Amino acid sequence: MKVPARIGSATPARATPARIGRGVRSSRQADRVRACVAVLALVLVAGAGWAQDAEEPGELDRVLTMHHEARGGLEKLRSIQAARATGTMSVQGMEAPFTIQLRRPNQVRVEGDFGGMALIQAFDGEQAWGQQPGQPKPAAFAGDVAAAQAADAVLSGPWFEYTEPGYEVELAGREEIENGEAWKLVVTAPGGVTHQVFIGTEDGLEKKRISKADFGFGLEDSETRFEDYREVDGLMLAHRHILSSSMGEMPLTLDSWEINPEIAPDIFFMPGQMANSALGLDAILERHEAARGDSAAEVRSVSASGAVVMLGFEVPMTVAFARPGFFRIDIDMQGLPMVLAYDGETAWNVSPMQGVIEPTPLPEEMVGAVGILSDFLWGGLARTGEASLAGVEKVGRDETYRLDIATAEGEARALYLGGEDFLERRIVFDGAFLGSTGEIDVTIGDYMDVGGLKVPDTIRIAVEGVVAVELRIQEAAAGADVDPASFTMPAPADPETPGPAL
């Protein structure tokens, strides 16, 4: 299981100070604003649970049981799927409204408005990202910043309980703190980050937490006190958090908590490409040609290797492309060789799992679908007919330009070009593929540069909404020595000679 990092914390592996975000250099005030946003998720983690150490079933177990009961009980905690909180943070005399949204198991999105400066920090379960003042679009975080953003994502949900895998806790006795006596717990998260958590001996609620945090100026100790507990939908939640650090004391007042609100999953993921709706067809096509690169036309052949996912199997494959429109895919289906090839005129295959053991031409209705793979690689899809601009539409999280293309053969295709990179992202048309007929939807993943040619890392082909095959290209090389005869269908085997003529 991939272990997330912690919001407002960092792994001890690096001591290099990390900045919040990447991009425009800003003033000291903006740095502090970003630092405040970085800790919003941290200070909102009130009354979280921890992984119980099985070797200490005595007093520690009683403390954690009391803590869970004080929060509302395990049954209630386990019923929570999402939460939303709004409030105001006082930052050196400035009141900053914010919203935090959380969704099981570890997704977090924090938005703040600091004097007209909008900031976003989020974690989608794998990728930490954000948008800082002056940035035209969101950006992914990396290194220590990503670790600091992601680490508390598991803990930040009010549903978190101490049985979470990878978390350990030990009871370190009792201490007198600002608001009474408390049990002191030392919580160790995956990766070795530790927190000191203080649970009130009288009411079982979390009173204080001490942890390492990154406020944009390097790692330092931070302390958060939790006050003003109120019942919300059967849960006891703190409505006042007081964060103390080298920046001073920053009170945070929560005006509202919502339990299990409707939260769209997409908000936790970084938005993709953004299109310019003012661009016309000619400008889009011009940028598309430029995106393909001047040197792309010099590439005469490409060889690639990777995997294909089909019929529930992920098996190795090799691919060869050659101009003007040839390609061949060889698949090792657990010892059974499969071939799908096209020489510009004839599409053919060998598929023992489907009973096709001789090289066999594909039906005419499948030739168009197979030929599109070749047209796509060489950047010819936009030139296969008369194009018109249909507007801007989303493909996944990317905004794209939709071009409606009428081919010379009378076929209609919808081609989607990335809003920023102007490369093919999707093509939709009617046809047949691998024995199924209907709407064929080809979606393309990210691209790699192979000798100036843009080669996709993923091509997914669905028929009537059902994924038929996914090609995953892991390595590719331009200028490969490819035998032109390999694309042409071999002659049928001699009836007196068993086996295919391959």
Image (spheres, rainbow, N blue to C red):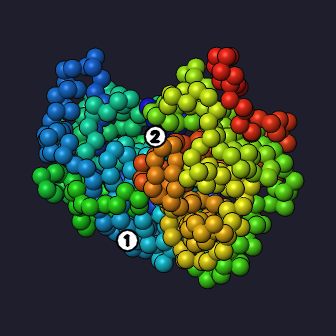
Task: Inspect the image, locate mark 1, and give the three-letter code of the amino acid beneath it.
Answer: Pro
**Dot 1: what SS?**
strand
Say which residue appears at 25% left-offset and 50% top-offset: 81
User: According to the image, label 1 marks what residue?
Assistant: 97
Viewer can see residue 264: yes
Image point (18%, 46%), residue name = 79
Where residue 24 appears, as percent x and y from the top left, is 65, 66
Task: Tell which tag, 2 or 1, sits nearer the viewer.
Answer: 2
Relative depth, front residue between 476 and 38: 476
Relative depth, front residue between 273 and 4: 273
Q: Is residue 33 visible?
A: no
Residue furthest to the front in view is: 496
Q: What x and y, as percent, mark residue 281?
A: 66, 79
In the displayed structure, would residue 241 be above or below residue 461?
A: below
Q: Quadrant of the C terminus?
A: top right
Q: Is residue 59 left or right of residue 107?
A: left
Q: Which corner quadrant of the image does residue 110 belong to?
A: bottom left
At 58% from the left edge and 72% from the top edge, which residue is drawn?
404
Whether residue 91 sits left or right of residue 134 in the image: it is: left
